[in-house]
Amino acid sequence: MRRKKLRITEADYLKANRRASRQEEIESHGHPVQGRAMIHKSKKVYDRNRMKRAAIKSDDSSFFYSSN
């Protein structure tokens, strides 16, 4: 039986480098560093849930319409 030669693909190479970089980062800082921050959402974008939360937080009932 012939043995297959191990081929290191580009994906494997990138994965190994990222893993090594991550380990170095943890060792230098003492803890994992947050890798992804939340993207800022524009206030100009219509977001009904955010408007409701703001109204409830400020105790402003003008957002809720009465059907009387």
Image: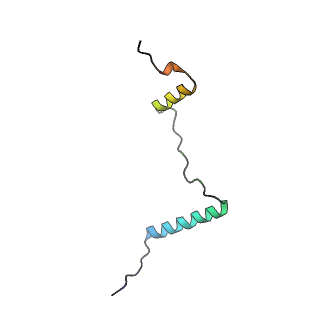
Q: Is residue 57 visible?
A: yes
Q: Where residue 17 sits in the image (x, y, percent)? A: 53, 68
Q: How is the image coloured?
A: rainbow
* Residue 46 shows in this picture: no
Residue 5 versus residue 48 in the image, above or below? below
Q: Residue at x 52, y 44 (%)?
A: 39
Q: Please say if 43 is above or below 1.
A: above
Q: Residue 49 vs residue 22: left or right?
A: left
- Which quarter of the figure has residue 48? top left
60 and 18: which is toward the camera: 60
Q: Is residue 58 left or right of residue 4?
A: right
Say which residue appears at 41% left-offset and 15% top-offset: 67
Residue 43 in picture, x, y percent from top left: 52, 33
Count up the numbered dots: 0
Quadrant where the C terminus sits is top left
- Give the camera-side residue of 8 and 60: 60
User: What residue occupies the far left of the structure in this picture?
Assistant: 1
Quadrant in which the N terminus appears: bottom left
Q: Quadrant of residue 24?
A: bottom right
Residue 35 locus on image (x, y percent): 56, 54
Q: Which residue sits furthest bottom?
A: 1
Q: Residue at x 47, y 21 (%)?
A: 64
